[in-house]
Structures are given as structure tokens and as C-alpha cells.
Image (spheres, rainbow, N blue to C red):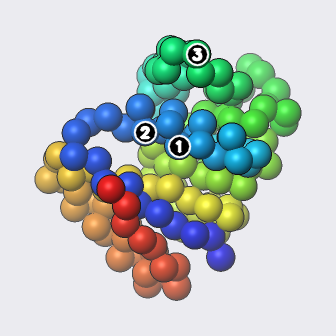
Amino acid sequence: MPTIRFVKLKKPEKAKHLCLLAEKYFSEGKRVLLTVSDDNQGVTLDRFMWTYSKGAFLPHAYDNGSVECFDEPVVITLKERNCNNAQVLIMGAPCSLEFVRRFEQVVDFAELYDDSLAEAARERFRQYREAGFAPDMHE
């Protein structure tokens, strides 16, 4: 059963946190899968990963169907498909419980700066608990 961690966001800075978390897990030698909700977010995050931090290099690919991602340590995807055999799932977009179960570690976000996003995060937190996970919350 995966470890599920919620990260509290008080400002709309999810892209920055996606990059920082991917970098953290990559530096620990783990393969990472990042989910996004649409192609615009995927392309934007792909570009942002090259510029979010001076001197940082995070090898990654955007799984848009035109590239092979088997060997990529970090992959951005729209689909619930673990194409790089990642151990860590960082959810820029929510995923099904069935998909979440396939990972060792999962990161979700509680976007507290928006009431509807915060309520959706509370609901996901409840669903994780009801499914037998033990999610925890981090600043």
C-alpha cells in the first residue's frame, strides 16, 4: 500500500511544487510520474521544468504519444499509465484509487487558496481513508 502525502498550497504555485518534488524524488534515485489534466498543462509543465530553477537539470519527457518514455526517470502524462515504471506518483491532476494503488509513494495537493479545490482535496482525503490508506498532511 502506498504512502500518501498531501501538500498544502496556500498560493497557486502547483507547477513549482511539482518540479521541486520531482527533483527531490529523482535525486533519491526514484522514477517519477506526474499527472496533468490537459495538454495545455502538460506542455506548460514540460517547458517550466527546463527553467524553474537556475542550474537544475531534471531529465524528463512529456508522454504525448509521440515519444517513448520507458527510460525517462520523470514523465508528465495525461493518462493513468505508468509508462516509465515509476515508484512515485505526483498528482497534478487527481487519479483513481485503482491507479494510486500501483505506486510506493503518492503526493496529492490540498489547494487551500480556492474553496472548491480545497473541498475536492478534503473529499479525496476522505476517500483515501475509506479505502484503507493513511494519508498525511504537510506544509
| Disc 3 from disc 1: Cα separation | 16 Å
Q: Is residue 114 above or below residue 123?
A: above
So how many labels did they put on this image?
3
The residue sitting at the left extreme is 115
- Which comes before the other along the chain, label 3 or label 2? 2
Quadrant housing residue 41: top left
- Quarter of the image for the C terminus: give it: bottom left
Comparing 74 with 68, the one in front is 74
Q: Residue at x 77, y 22 (%)?
A: 67
- Quarter of the image for the N terminus: give it: bottom right
Q: Amino acid at mark 2?
A: His
Q: Amino acid at mark 1?
A: Leu
Q: Is residue 35 above or below residue 133?
A: above
| Disc 2 from disc 1: Cα separation | 6 Å
Q: Residue at x 50, y 37 (%)?
A: 20
- Label 3's element? loop
Comparing 17 with 98, the one in front is 17
| Disc 3 from disc 2: Cα separation | 17 Å
Circle 3 is placed at which residue position? 55
Quadrant housing residue 136: bottom left
- Label 1's element? helix
Circle 2 is placed at which residue position? 17
**Of the two numbered discs 3 and 1 in the rendering, the one whose residue sits closer to the viewer:** 3
Check residue 21 in the rendering and tell me which mark sits there, or answer none: 1
Residue 13: % across, % down: 32, 34
